[in-house]
Amino acid sequence: MDPGARRGAQAEAENLMRALADAVRHGSDPASFEHASAWAPMRDFLADLSQSRAAQGQTAGETSRFVLALKKPLFESAQRRLDGDAAALAKSLWSISTTVDKLAQHTVNTYQLAREDVIRRQQEELLELSTPVVKLWEGVLAVPMIGVLDSSRTQIVMETLLQSIVDTGSELAIIDITGVPTVDTLVAQHLLKTVSAIRLMGADCIISGIRPQIAQTIVHLGIDLNGIATKATLADALALALRQTGWRVARGD
């Protein structure tokens, strides 16, 4: 462990001991750890500790062992204070063990919640990265979709695309599903919801990437795409978008 990390761990250990000492000084019962106000500083400290360790990528086991390490110095202190009184020593050791175990259990629980939050944020960031909104032309945006299209991803696409329409004042958006492996009823419903939201913003939408297999699937499932412009390729969709927005592209000599 490098000196900086060692100093940080030592400071955390000192703060942990201080929070425990404050709770014990107020006569807090370990059985009331989860709800008693006297234990609130300790719960807050363990929550911060768990979030910090989760963000650093440490495991729940490593984090709980840090808390369980309190037992050794507390046991040694009890043995020095109660040397010669076996009954009192046994009672003290049991109380220490029960209390520290509760702290460790709470640490693991809060660690798991913190870790789940880190994973959720990372998933959201990956979803945003996997659905970029690209400005193809003045007034024309495109979203190239790759991979499986589910509810959470569709929601991210919709929010990102609608915000981009507002930011750029675009009149038309192209949703390219060339990279979507299959289209079923659920995927089609997601697409229709996205198109409806785009139209409510005053823009229009073209769906590109309608391959022969996908076209057959859509017909077989009885999915109604009437009123929605569809094209086989992104290039065809861009050509249509330029015509609809009044642009004319001429080949130079």
Image (spheres, rainbow, N blue to C red):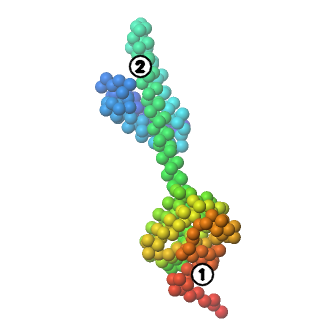
The answer to which image quadrant residue 223 occupies is bottom right
Of all residues, the one furthest to the right in this rendering is 213
Residue 83: give x, y in percent of width and height: 42, 10
Query: Image point 53% across, 86% down: which residue?
Result: 247
Q: On screen, 62 above or below 242?
A: above
Q: On screen, 153 above or below 76?
A: below
- Looking at the rendered structure, the kind of residue marked 2 is Ser
Q: Nearer the viewer, mark 1 or mark 2?
A: 1
| 13 vs 40, nearest the viewer | 40
The answer to which image quadrant residue 239 occupies is bottom right
Left/right placement of residue 245 relative to residue 87 reads: right
| 145 vs 106, nearest the viewer | 145
Query: Image point 59% across, 61% down: which residue?
Result: 185
Left/right placement of residue 126 relative to residue 200 reads: right
- Looking at the rendered structure, the kind of residue marked 1 is Ala
Residue 215: give x, y in percent of width and height: 66, 69
Of all residues, the one furthest to the top in this rendering is 84
Query: Image point 48% across, 27% down: which residue?
Result: 68
Q: Secondary structure at mark 2?
A: helix
Q: On screen, 149 above or below 52?
A: below
Q: Secondary structure at mark 1?
A: helix
Quote the CA–CA distance across marks 1 and 2: 76 Å
Residue 4: give x, y in percent of width and height: 48, 40
Q: Which residue is mark 2?
A: 95
In which quadrant will I find the N terminus? top right
Q: Which residue is mark 1?
A: 239
Asked if the residues shown at circle 1 and circle 2 are in contact, with their CB atoms under 8 angstroms apart, the answer is no
The answer to whether residue 10 is visible is: no
Left/right placement of residue 240 relative to residue 202 reads: right
Query: Image point 61% across, 72% down: which residue?
Result: 208
